[in-house]
Image (spheres, rainbow, N blue to C red):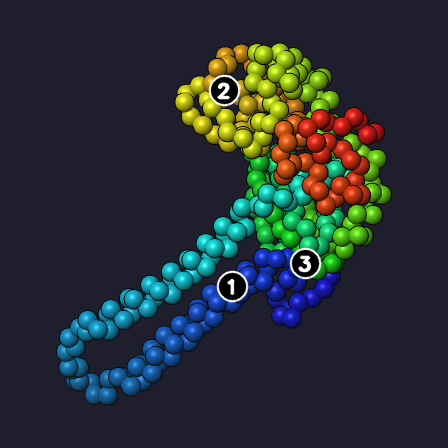
């Protein structure tokens, strides 16, 4: 594990870590400056204006508008600068770029199960290349966990029944800590792992050395068949009792209550587990619930399959382009690839 130039600060190894550190130093600097200033002024006044005679009465002091405005406006500007700076980094961190490679993360007591969109699975380890944007799509099988990579300065809760995202772009090869940062039971402190950052060529050969695993989209396609989804949601509109799913992901959905939403992971999951919650305009709420019949990992596979059904979308979200060289040429287009196992 590399050390950084300050012993109490973890290695800075992502595109945002320097920005987070700069803001943090600014906050610490402002805090330190005003603590010293106020402490110093208090000490100085305590000595200078101490009572020298037992019956001494100080002269009355009238207020000063000039001073009051000054010490209201200056702190206001400082506080707003922290807000604006922090919000800017927050927005950047909370909007994953569209062309990011997707990695699925499932937390459970007490381990991290990770799967690349090209199928490779890992446990408590995540291999990533430098210089590529990685988007983590995370969920939990049991309680709340939190996926924390200090060297990248990113951290997000991982929740049961919901998907959360975070993204990063690593800048330095090395092995970095992965922590669970939410108390999740007895072995919470052991829910740790490693992020292994490699050169892109090294990563590609690592990836191609692990190809004999089924991609989530292909597994999802099999579930789609075996659970009978296909009889209502035919990929090409056959069935007719349910809306077609081709091109659904990322597009607009019109509901029968006149609302419109964008189809994302959470919407698809809700529609599988609680189909009556949001019914597409023109269809009847006849779909049975699949709650309890599909595990969080299987849900990810089905969602991954639905994502792969994009119609001529240049930014197809399944196996991202940079990895395709080393990965099997699976499901990059509109038609799902055959089983690679
Ligand atoms: Cu998982 Cu703490």
Distance from the alpha carbon under mark 3 to that under mark 1: 20 Å
Q: Mark 3 or mark 1: which comes first in sequence?
A: 1
Percent position of residue 148, x then y: 62, 50
**Regarding mark 3 in the picture, which secondary structure is present there?**
loop
Left or right: where does residue 39 sit relative to residue 233?
left
Left or right: where does residue 225 sit relative to residue 155?
right
Q: Mark 2 or mark 3: which comes first in sequence?
A: 3
Number of callouts in the render? 3
Marker disc for residue 280: 2
Q: Residues within 10 Å of mark 1 (few under 14, many from 20)?
A: some
Q: Mark 2 or mark 1: which comes first in sequence?
A: 1
Percent position of residue 166, x then y: 59, 46
Q: Is residue 110 visible?
A: no
Q: Would you place residue 321 above or below residue 292 in this image? A: below
Q: Would you place residue 40 above or below residue 22 in this image? A: below
Q: Foreground: 84 or 156?
A: 84
Percent position of residue 241, x then y: 57, 11
What residue sits right under mark 3 in the picture? 171
**Regarding mark 2 in the picture, which secondary structure is present there?**
loop
Residue at x-position 56% and y-position 33%: 250
């Amino acid at each position: 594990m590399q050390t950084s130039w300050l012993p109490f600060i973890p290695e800075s190894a992502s595109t945002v870590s320097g920005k987070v550190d700069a803001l943090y130093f600014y906050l610490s600097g402002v805090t330190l400056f005003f603590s010293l200033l106020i402490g110093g002024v208090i000490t100085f006044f305590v000595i200078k204006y101490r009572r020298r005679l037992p019956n001494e009465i100080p002269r009355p002091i009238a207020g000063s508008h000039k001073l009051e405005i000054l010490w209201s406006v200056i702190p206001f500007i400082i506080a707003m600068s922290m807000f604006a700076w922090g919000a800017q980094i927050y927005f950047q961190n909370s909007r994953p770029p569209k062309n990011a490679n997707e990695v699925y993360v499932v937390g459970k007591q007490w381990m991290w199960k990770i799967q690349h969109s090209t199928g490779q699975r890992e446990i408590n380890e995540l291999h990533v290349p430098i210089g590529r944007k990685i988007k983590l799509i995370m969920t939990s099988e049991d309680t709340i966990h939190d996926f924390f990579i200090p060297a990248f300065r990113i951290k997000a809760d991982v929740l049961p029944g919901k998907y959360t995202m975070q993204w990063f772009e690593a800048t330095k090869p090395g092995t970095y800590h992965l922590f669970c940062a939410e108390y999740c039971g007895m072995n919470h402190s052991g829910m740790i792992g490693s992020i292994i950052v490699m050169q892109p060529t090294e990563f590609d050969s690592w990836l191609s050395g692990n190809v004999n695993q089924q991609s989530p989209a292909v597994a999802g396609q099999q579930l789609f068949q075996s659970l009978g989804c296909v009889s209502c949601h035919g990929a090409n509109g056959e069935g007719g009792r349910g809306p077609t799913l081709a091109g659904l992901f990322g597009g607009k959905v019109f509901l029968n209550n006149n609302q419109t939403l964008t189809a994302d992971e959470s919407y698809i999951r809700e529609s599988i587990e609680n189909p009556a919650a949001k019914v597409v305009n023109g269809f009847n709420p006849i779909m049975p619930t699949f709650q309890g019949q599909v595990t969080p990992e299987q849900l990810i596979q089905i969602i991954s399959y639905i994502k792969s059904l994009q119609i001529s979308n240049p930014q197809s979200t399944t196996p991202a382009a940079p990895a395709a060289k080393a990965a099997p040429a699976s499901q990059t287009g509109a038609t799902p690839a055959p089983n690679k196992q």
